[in-house]
Structures are given as C-alpha cells and as structure tokens.
Amino acid sequence: MADTSGKSRGLVWLAVIAAVLLAAVVAINVVLLMKIESGGKPTSAVTLTKAKRPSDPIFVKIDPFTVNLQDDFYGRLLYVGLSLQVADKDTEEFLLKHMPQVRSRLLVLHSAQNPQKLATAEGKRELTAAILAALAEPMAESQPQLHIDDVLFTEFIVQ
C-alpha cells in the first residue's frame, strides 16, 4: 500500500500558495485599474500624500490585535499593532470616529494572510498595500478624502 500523505500534504501546500498568489494578483490589478481610470492618480477614498505635511506628524494608533492565520497544519497566530500616519486632522478624526469599521476590515484582512509570506519583507510590503486598499473602500456616505501617508507596524509577531 503506497503512502500518499506526502502527496496530499504537497497538494494542500500548492493550493495554499496558489490562493495567496491569486489574491496578490487580484489586489495588484485593482490598484492598477484604479490608477488607469484616473489617468495615473488614485481614485480611491484614500490618497497617499507626500507633499505639504504638517510640522508635527499625525498618527492614528490602532490597538494591537491577534488573529488566526491561514495555515492548514499548525494553529498559527499573528499579533500586530500598527499606526497610520495621516496628513490632516480631518483624516485623523474620521478614522477615530469609524475605528470599529477600520479594525473590522483589518482583522478580516490579516486573518486571510499566510504566515510564511508575512515572515518576509516583501510580504509585509504587500500587507501594507492591502491595508491601504482595504481602507480605500468608503466607510460612510459623507466621507472626506482620506490622506494616509504611511502604515507603520509597531508590533508584529507571527507565532
């Protein structure tokens, strides 16, 4: 009788890697399509700004949270804390007012991540882009233009 557990395990890993790659390709396509539609400018509700920053940086702290990661073989966890660097008080006030929505989006996004990918610098950069894309979706009807300069990881443990 042949041992197929190795083959099954390999197929599962292949499926997980394929799903992660597919998600990354979809996210990149969405970002590129948004740029093309606006003639090179982001069309989302979030705009990355580098010009005319206030003299003191404005940070919106998001309390650390723990999520289960997508891993079929081990119960892997991600403990992450982050801050958003924003360009203006309007963005800060809006994000603070809608913090339950912000946290919910981030929890869902982070729980869909692969632990092996998050261990790399490229994986963290992709996660940063995905966070910006998740926050680009409108949270309210009368939402001002959000100006997020950067996503800063203040705590990051994959276990």
Image: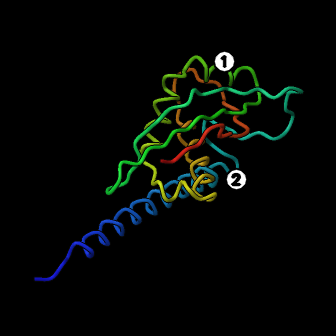
SS type, badge 2: loop
In which quadrant will I find the N terminus? Answer: bottom left
- Sequence-wise first label, 2 or 1: 2
Residue 84 image offset from top left, x and y in percent: 67, 33
Task: Give the structural element (helix, strand or loop) at label 1.
Answer: helix
Residue at the (66%, 30%) spot, across then down? 146
Q: Residue at x 32, y 57 (%)?
A: 73
- Please say if 29 is above or below 7: above
Q: Residue at left 15%, top 82%?
A: 2
Residue that numbered label 1 is attached to: 93
Task: Tell me the distance, in whole angstroms, between the alpha carbons under discs 2 and 1.
Answer: 28 Å
**Image quarter of residue 142:** top right
Q: Position of residue 151 (x, y in %)?
A: 67, 40
Q: Is residue 91 left or right of residue 33?
A: right
Q: Which amino acid is tagged 2? A: Gly
Left or right: 11 as drawn, with respect to 91: left
Depicted 22 relative to depicted 10: above or below: above
What is the count of numbered marks?
2
Q: Amino acid at mark 1?
A: Glu
Q: Is residue 88 left or right of residue 157?
A: right
Q: Is disc 2 surrounded by few (<14), some (14 to 19) or many (20+) residues within 10 Å?
A: few
Q: Residue furthest right?
A: 55
User: Which residue position is annotated with label 2?
Assistant: 40
